[in-house]
Image (cartoon, rainbow, N blue to C red):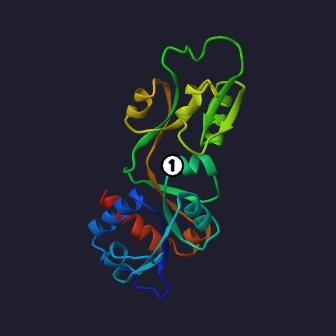
Amino acid sequence: MYIMNKPIRIALTKGRLEKDTVGLLEKIGFDCTTVREKGRKLILPISDANLEVVLAKANDVITYVEHGVCDMGVVGKDTIMEMGGSFFELVDLGFGRCRFALAAKKGSGFYGGYDIKTIATKYPNVARAYFESKGMDLEIVKIEGSVELAPLLELSDGIVDIVETGTTLKENGLEIIEDIAPISARLIVNTVSMKLRQAEIEKLVSLVEANL
C-alpha cells in the first residue's frame, strides 16, 4: 500500500492503546504479526504497510513525535492535555474512552467557603488550567500512586483524576463533583513529517478514519 524506502515510524503507547491500535491496523488490512509476537523488541516493522512501530510510555510518545524521531504517534488525550507540545492532533480514534473529573469526599460541600482549595493529582497542569478557568486559586499536591487516598487522609480537599466507571471513587467514599474533559486516544503527527511526507501520512490517516 505504501511504496517508499523509509518506513513511516509510529509510536504507540504500551498496553491497552497499543492493543487497540494494532487491532485498528489489522482492520485496515496490515499484517501486525511482528507486533503481536514482539517478545522484548521495542521497534517492530510492519513490512506490508511500510510502517515501523515503536512501543513507548505515553509521555515518551509525545517526546518522540515532537522531536521527529517518530513521524506519528497514538497517545491519550490526558497525556496531551498534561504535557502539551508542538505537533498536529489529527484524529480522535475513539478508543480508550474515559474522562478527567473533579472528586471529593461525599457530602464535603467542595465549593463551600472561601478558603483556597488543595487538590491532589497526577496531572497538575490539567488541574491548574481547570481551576484558573474558574478564576480560582488552588494549591496542588502531586501524587504518583492512588490519588483517592489524599482526601481520606485530609491531605487535600479534592482530587483531579482519570475516571472510567467511578467505582473506585465510590468504594472509597468519594463522589464526582463535576466532569472536566473527555479523554480518548488521539493520532498525532510531527509537524515536519506532515510537510515532507504529506501524501503518505494523509493516505494512512484516511485509511484509519475509514476503519474507525
Q: Quadrant of the C terminus?
A: bottom left
Tell me residue 162's x, y (percent).
49, 40
Residue 126 located left or right of residue 54: right
Residue 82 located left or right of residue 56: right
Instruction: Check disc 1 and give the amino acid type.
Output: Lys
Nearer to us in this view, 121 or 151: 151
* Residue located at (45% from left, 23% from top): 173
Quadrant of the rendered image containing residue 22:
bottom left
Tell me residue 36's x, y (percent).
33, 72
* Residue located at (62% from left, 41% from top): 143
* Residue located at (41% from left, 64% from top): 205
Image height of 15 relative to 145, above or below: below
Quadrant of the rendered image containing residue 190:
bottom right
Tell me residue 31's x, y (percent).
30, 77
Tell me residue 66's x, y (percent).
62, 64
Q: Please, which residue is most extreme toward the bottom here? A: 5
Give the structural element (helix, strand or loop) at label 1: helix
Q: Quadrant of the N terminus?
A: bottom left
Q: Which residue is mark 1?
A: 77
Image height of 7 relative to 68, above or below: below
* Residue located at (55% from left, 13% from top): 109
